[in-house]
């Protein structure tokens, strides 16, 4: 009897997690987050508007019920076996009413937060390597990028994320509206907010010193956190740069 062939899973597919936002036990919306690690602690990175339920630019309440989110329900990888999941509830407020998450020193002006995760023994964490943000690969306008998340809360098998391809739509080294973000042409749907965005190249690529080759292996640069479209039906989305994650984690007591 022939042994089954081993299945290869991209490490970045293990980082993105399906998130359901709840208020008083009722589901409001689905979104995406991804795990990072700092000072031996695990955090879920997602958007400020996901956990607050408020549009960061307009102040509009996003839920038709008007109820503010009080809990995230997260599908985590099970420690028992890759390909199995466990569901965990993560409160968003302390008993005092204070928010559990850490936000940027500029507050909602940066639509990214880091939420400390309970490190339960039945959960396996697969943090995204933030060092990928420093990989020496030139980023240029019109290059294809991948958004790794859950459009409309959809997944592939189980709770594996979907990789959607977009293209860089603004000069990547210029800040959109003076904030640390750039634009992509995004045919994304609800549920993708909070997804990691990466540049993945197979073969040759440009570096700061010239050119290089991956020797047949994929090379990856982490570009930031997707936060949804910038205006109505416009197919243009905003990506917050990796630097904002480091600045948020620097506010965590005992953090880097």
Image: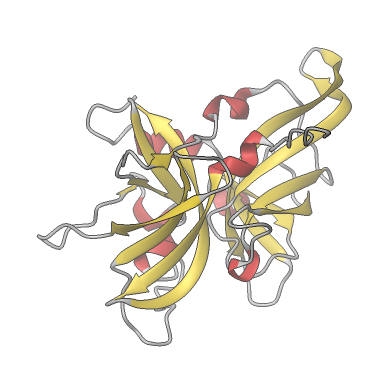
Residue 156 figure quarter:
bottom right
Q: Nearer the viewer, residue 110 or 255?
A: 255
**Placement of 178 over or under 59, stated as above or below:** above
Where does the image place residue 130, in percent across and percent down from the top left? 53, 30
Q: Nearer the viewer, residue 25 or 243?
A: 25
Where does the image place residue 194, in percent across and percent down from the top left? 53, 55
Q: Nearer the viewer, residue 88 or 215?
A: 88
**Placement of 99 over or under 59, stated as above or below:** above
Where does the image place residue 79, in percent across and percent down from the top left? 44, 39
- Quadrant containing the N terminus is top right
Q: Residue at x 28, y 68 (%)?
A: 70
Residue 61 figure quarter:
bottom left
Q: Residue at x 50, y 36 (%)?
A: 126
**Placement of 46 over or under 5, stated as above or below:** below
Q: Residue at x 43, y 64 (%)?
A: 50
Q: Which residue is outermost to the top?
A: 209
Q: Residue at x 68, y 51 (%)?
A: 147
């Amino acid at each position: 009897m022939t042994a089954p062939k081993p299945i290869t899973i991209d490490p970045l597919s293990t980082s993105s997690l399906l998130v359901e936002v709840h208020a008083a036990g009722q589901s409001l919306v689905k979104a995406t987050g991804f795990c990072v690690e700092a000072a031996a602690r695990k955090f879920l990175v997602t958007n400020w508007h996901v956990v607050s339920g408020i549009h960061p630019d307009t102040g509009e309440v996003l839920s038709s019920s008007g109820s503010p989110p009080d809990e995230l329900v997260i599908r985590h990888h099970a420690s028992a076996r890759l390909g199995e999941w466990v569901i965990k509830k993560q409160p968003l407020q302390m008993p005092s009413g204070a928010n559990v998450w850490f936000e940027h020193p500029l507050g909602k002006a940066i639509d990214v937060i880091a939420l400390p995760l309970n490190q339960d023994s039945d959960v396996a964490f697969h943090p995204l390597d933030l060092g990928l943000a420093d990989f020496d690969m030139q980023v240029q306008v019109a290059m294809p990028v991948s958004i790794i998340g859950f459009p409309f809360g959809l997944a592939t098998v189980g709770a594996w994320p979907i990789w959607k391809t977009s293209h860089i739509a603004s000069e990547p080294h210029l800040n959109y509206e003076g904030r640390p973000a750039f634009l992509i042409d995004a045919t994304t749907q609800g549920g993708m907010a909070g997804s990691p965005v990466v540049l993945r190249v197979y073969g040759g690529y440009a570096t700061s010193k010239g050119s290089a080759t991956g020797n047949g292996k994929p090379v990856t640069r982490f570009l930031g956190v997707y936060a949804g479209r910038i205006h109505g039906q416009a197919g243009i989305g905003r990506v917050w740069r990796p630097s904002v994650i480091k600045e948020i984690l620097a506010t965590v007591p005992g953090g880097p």
